[in-house]
Image (spheres, rainbow, N blue to C red):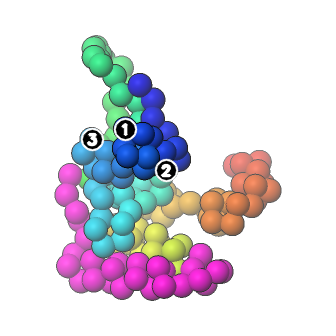
Amino acid sequence: MVFFSQRKYSAFAGSYLPIQRLAAASGLAVLSQDCHMCLHAVYGPWFSLRGVLIFKEVKMKGGPSISPGLTQDVISEEGKRQLKAQCDKAVRSLGQEATQEWIELRRMASRLAGIDKRCWYSDEQISYHYGLNREALVADIKGA
């Protein structure tokens, strides 16, 4: 079965798939209650949850392995307070200011979790995802 994160399902009372909870339950990532983002061990919050494949039965011999997610929250208590404060600030913000606050929340979570900057989205990717600037993404891909 295939479920997509951007689609509402009658099986979930007409709501969206609880994709973040599924990612946490599967061991892919930890769902931070402070910033409401999933944090992966390597990529931090710099990955997308677009869908879920559910198999009735899976038999694998060898084959590719999946990078393990975080098994526990690695952010200190002080870091969690900082994340919650930034998340609250982002929620209260409007317009372009809100966009910048959400980007800062993602960056802050990355710094606090020790995520390598090479895994962060580029400025062009951020421009695309937060501003829906397709041209910026195409330019970034061509430059890669």
Q: CA distance from mark 2 to mark 1?
A: 23 Å
Q: Earlier in the sequence, mark 1 or mark 3?
A: 1
Establish if 65 lies above or below 7: above
Task: Decide if residue 8 is on the left or right side of residue 68.
Answer: right
- Regarding residue 63, the answer to whether it shows in the image is yes
Establish if 58 lies above or below 120: above
Q: Residues within 10 Å of mark 3 (few under 14, many from 20)?
A: few
Q: Position of residue 28 (x, y in %)?
A: 31, 45
Q: Earlier in the sequence, mark 3 or mark 2?
A: 3
Q: Quadrant of residue 113?
A: bottom left
- Regarding residue 28, the answer to whether it shows in the image is no
Q: Which mark is residue 11?
A: 1
Q: Secondary structure at mark 3?
A: helix
Q: CA distance from mark 3 to mark 2?
A: 15 Å
**Are dots 3 and 2 in contact, CB under 8 Å?**
no
Q: Position of residue 17 (x, y in %)?
A: 40, 45
Q: Which residue has dot 2 on it?
A: 48
Q: Secondary structure at mark 2?
A: loop
Q: CA distance from mark 1 to mark 3?
A: 20 Å
Residue type, label 3 = Ser
Establish if 109 lies above or below 84: above
Q: Does 101 appear in magenta?
A: no
